[in-house]
Image: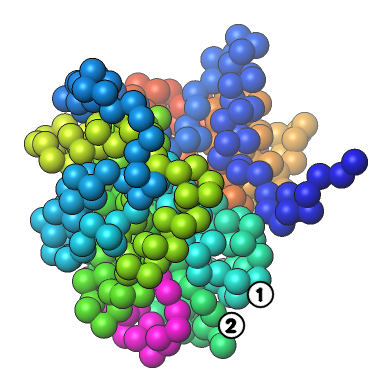
C-alpha cells in the first residue's frame, strides 16, 4: 500500500517542527525558551470570551452558514470601511477556519497546475508549500536585510512571465516585520496594473501590530481592487490563535469560489468563534492597542539585545512580532564539536546548547537568517538572548 504522491509536493512546516522539538526537550525536564511560534502570549480579552459563553447559552451550537453568519460578515464589511476605507458587501466576505484556510481557499480557487506564483522573500512559511499543494510553481524574489527585506517593484516585474497567475505578500510581514509604505505599494500597483490577468493576495493578518502609523492596503488602488484578495483574521491582533477564525474580502467571483471549496472541506467556521469574533470587531479596541504597545516595547528590547550579539545583522521591524537577523557570519564556524554550515545547523546548535528554540530562515525562503518571535514576556526574552550570546561566543 502507498500513500498519495501529493504528500511529496510540499514540505512539513518548519515552525511547527521546531515547536515540536522544543516541546519534546521540555518534556525531558530541560528549561527551553520557545521563540518559534507566532502566538501572542496575552489572554483573549475577557469581553470576547464572555461573548462566546453567551453564544453557547443562546444556542449558537448548530451548523453555521458555509461563508459565515450574515451579521459577522456585515461587521467585517464595516471594519474594512472604518479601518481601511474599503467598500465590500457581505457576499464578498468568506469566513474560514483561520487565515491559513482563507489563503488555501484562494490559492485553490485561482491556481492551476503549472501556473506561476510570484512571492517576495522572506515570506510566511506556508506560502510556497500551499502553492506546491495546488501544483503551482512558486517564483521567489529575494530581498536582503539591506533592503529592509522589501523587494522593489522592478524586481517583481522582472519575475512576471506569461505563466504568472498570482502575486502574494504580507504587510506587516511575517517573518521580517517590514511594512510596505503607501509609496512602495503605489509603485507595485503601477506594475501590476500592466498585467490584468494576475490576482493579488494581500495578507494583512498583522494589521493591528504596526509600530509606524496607519496601515496601508494595496486594495486602496481602485484599478486593482477587483483583483486583490485581502486576508485577515483575529489570531494576532486579538490574541485569538486557538479560536481559528480568518476571513477574506474579495470580488464576488473569488468569494463564491472560496465558499464552494470550503463547502466540501470544512463547511462553516466554528459557530462560537464566529460570535466571539463579532464581539472582537464591534467592541472597543483598547485591549488590541494595549497589546500593540507591549509588542512595540518588546521590539525595542530585542533590537537592543541583538546589538550585543556580534554575529547578528538586523533590520528594525516596523510591525508584527519577529526579529529576523542575518546570521551568515556564523556559517563555517565551530565550537569544537559542532560545525555550523547553515541556519538550520545554527538553530539546532542553539536548541541543544542554549536551550532556545528558533526557526531557520530557510523555512521563509531566506536561508541566511533565523526568526526570533518576541511574543513573550520581557524576562524570557532577556534570558534567551543572554543564553544565545554565551553559546554563540563559543563559535570560532
From the viewer's side, name the closer residue of 56 and 332. 56
| Residue 92 in picture, x, y percent from top left | 29, 62
- For the residue labelled by badge 1, is the local secondary structure a helix, a strand or a loop? loop
From the viewer's side, name the closer residue of 137 and 381. 137
| Magenta stretch: includes residue 41 | no
Residue shown at the point (20%, 25%) measured from the top left: 51
Residue shown at the point (60%, 9%) measured from the top left: 29
From the viewer's side, name the closer residue of 254 and 165. 254
Magenta highlight range: 186-202
| Magenta stretch: includes residue 190 | yes
Residue shown at the point (50%, 27%) measured from the top left: 34
Residue indicated by mark 1: 114
Horizontal side of residue 35 vs 77, given as left or right: right
Q: What colouring style does the render use?
A: rainbow
Mark 2 or mark 1: name the one nearer the start of the chain. Answer: 1
Please tell me the numbered disc located at residue 163: 2
Q: Quadrant of residue 184?
A: bottom left
Above or below residue 372? Residue 145 is: below
Amino acid at each position: 500500500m502507498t500513500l498519495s504522491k501529493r504528500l511529496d509536493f510540499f514540505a512539513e512546516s518548519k515552525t511547527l517542527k521546531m515547536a515540536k522539538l522544543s516541546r519534546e526537550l521540555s518534556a525531558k525536564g530541560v528549561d527551553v525558551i520557545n521563540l518559534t511560534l507566532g502566538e501572542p502570549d496575552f489572554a483573549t480579552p475577557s469581553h470576547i470570551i464572555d461573548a462566546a459563553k453567551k453564544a453557547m447559552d443562546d444556542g449558537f451550537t448548530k451548523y453555521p452558514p458555509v461563508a459565515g453568519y450574515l451579521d459577522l460578515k456585515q461587521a467585517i464589511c464595516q471594519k474594512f470601511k472604518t479601518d481601511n476605507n474599503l467598500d465590500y458587501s457581505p457576499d464578498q466576505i468568506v469566513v474560514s477556519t483561520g487565515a491559513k484556510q482563507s489563503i488555501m481557499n484562494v490559492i485553490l480557487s485561482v491556481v492551476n497546475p503549472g501556473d506561476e506564483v510570484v512571492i517576495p522573500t522572506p515570506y510566511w512559511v506556508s506560502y510556497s508549500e500551499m502553492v506546491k499543494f495546488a501544483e503551482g510553481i512558486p517564483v521567489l524574489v529575494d530581498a536582503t536585510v539591506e533592503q529592509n527585506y522589501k523587494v522593489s517593484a522592478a524586481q517583481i516585474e522582472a519575475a512576471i512571465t506569461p505563466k504568472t497567475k498570482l502575486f502574494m505578500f504580507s504587510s506587516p510581514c511575517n517573518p521580517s516585520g517590514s511594512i510596505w509604505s503607501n509609496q512602495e505599494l503605489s509603485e507595485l500597483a503601477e506594475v501590476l496594473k500592466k498585467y490584468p490577468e494576475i490576482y493579488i493576495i494581500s495578507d494583512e493578518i498583522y494589521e493591528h501590530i504596526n509600530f509606524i502609523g496607519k496601515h496601508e492596503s494595496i486594495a486602496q488602488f481602485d484599478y486593482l481592487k477587483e483583483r486583490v484578495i485581502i486576508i485577515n483574521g483575529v489570531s494576532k491582533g486579538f490574541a485569538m490563535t486557538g479560536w481559528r477564525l480568518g476571513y477574506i474580502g474579495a470580488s464576488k467571483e473569488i468569494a463564491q469560489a472560496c465558499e464552494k471549496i470550503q463547502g466540501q472541506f470544512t463547511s462553516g467556521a466554528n459557530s462560537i468563534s464566529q460570535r466571539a469574533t463579532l464581539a472582537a470587531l464591534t467592541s472597543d479596541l483598547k485591549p488590541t492597542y494595549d497589546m500593540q504597545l507591549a509588542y512595540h516595547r518588546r521590539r525595542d528590547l530585542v533590537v537592543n539585545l541583538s546589538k550585543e550579539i556580534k554575529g547578528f545583522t538586523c533590520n528594525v521591524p516596523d510591525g508584527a512580532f519577529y526579529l529576523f537577523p542575518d546570521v551568515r557570519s556564523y556559517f563555517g564556524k565551530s565550537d569544537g564539536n559542532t560545525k555550523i554550515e547553515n541556519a538550520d545547523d545554527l538553530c539546532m546548535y542553539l536548541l541543544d546548547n542554549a536551550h532556545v528554540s528558533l526557526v531557520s530562515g530557510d523555512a521563509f525562503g531566506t536561508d541566511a537568517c533565523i526568526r526570533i518571535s518576541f511574543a513573550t514576556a520581557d524576562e524570557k526574552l532577556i534570558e534567551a538572548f543572554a543564553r544565545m550570546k554565551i553559546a554563540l561566543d563559543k563559535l570560532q
